[in-house]
Image (cartoon, rainbow, N blue to C red):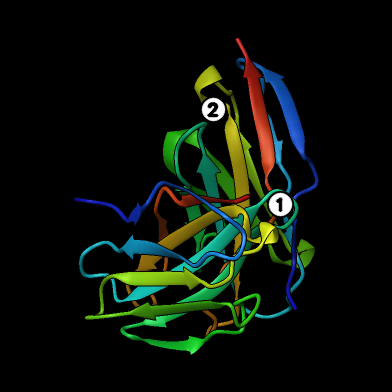
Amino acid sequence: GAGVSQSPSNKVTEKGKDVELRCDPISGHTALYWYRQSLGQGLEFLIYFQGNSAPDKSGLPSDRFSAERTGGSVSTLTIQRTQQEDSAVYLCASSLEAPHWEQYFGPGTRLTVT
Amino acid sequence: AQSVSQHNHHVILSEAASLELGCNYSYGGTVNLFWYVQYPGQHLQLLLKYFSGDPLVKGIKGFEAEFIKSKFSFNLRKPSVQWSDTAEYFCAVKAGAGSYQLTFGKGTKLSVIP
């Protein structure tokens, strides 16, 4: 079946602009996760959705970052007033509910802030 | 907060050599453990996972890992590597029964020389 898909695959934006990154999870997966992969920090957890609610937003690095999920499916990660330090690969993953817990990752969106 | 250490940043092996990649984590409670692989130009893929039971787990492509609770370790092994195993390998931990986020190590880049 289809895996996790993300769009766009690459995004170049100017400092100060807003960006939206999209994630389509595997059909039937109720849990959705956002991570960020950067050279200096490795893979960092950002936020988790169970259904449409996000019980834990503590991984979001600043209030410029927000995410939503609608219909228990597609999720959007929004970064407002982008900064150069936001440059990274943003990864989305999805899973069934525990105990079937392994997370399946999408190809990521490479964000470059100039 | 929990952390995951991967001791080797870059490992270079000749084909047919044996592989062992180290992974240690810092969490005293129940853990679920994972190894993911990222082949060049591809997204993260799950190699193997440990939830409970036999501490020796077998994954895809001939990989295996052993969970040693007393050592807080989950080392990845393969008896004979191939050029196609060239990739970056990430160890990840889910710490605690109620947790949902993965904490990743920094990754180990494996280069296999034909």
Query: Which circle, 1 or 2, is nearer the viewer?
Result: 1
Describe residue B70's horizontal placement relative to residue B86 as left or right: right
Dot 1 corresponds to which residue? B106
**Label for residue B41?**
none
Q: Position of residue B54 (x, y in %)?
A: 52, 60
Question: Label 1 vs label 2: CA separation?
Answer: 18 Å
| Amino acid type of the residue tagged 2 in the rendering | Asp
Residue at x 38%, y 80% (from the top left corner): A68
Does the CB distance between marks 1 and 2 fall below 8 Å?
A: no
- Report in which chain the residue with disc 2 lies: B
Within-10-Å neighbours for mark 1: few <14, some 14–19, many 20+: many
Q: Quadrant of residue B42?
A: top left
Element type at marker 1?
Answer: loop
Describe residue B8's horizontal placement relative to residue A99 as left or right: right
Q: Position of residue A13 (x, y in %)?
A: 53, 53
Residue at x 55%, y 57% (from the top left corner): B34
Within-10-Å neighbours for mark 2: few <14, some 14–19, many 20+: some
Residue A100 visible at all: no
Residue at x 61%, y 77% (from the top left corner): A59
- Report in which chain the residue with disc 1 lies: B
Dot 2 corresponds to which residue? B85
The answer to which of marks 1 and 2 sits earlier in the sequence is 2
| Amino acid type of the residue tagged 1 in the rendering | Lys
Q: Position of residue A114 (x, y in %)?
A: 63, 50
Numbered marks: total? 2
Compared with A23, B90 (above or below) is above
Q: Position of residue B78 (x, y in %)?
A: 59, 33
Compared with A21, A48 (above or below) is below
Describe residue B62's horizontal placement relative to residue A44 as left or right: left
Q: Quadrant of residue B64?
A: top right
Element type at marker 2?
Answer: helix
Describe residue B50's horizontal placement relative to residue A53 as left or right: right
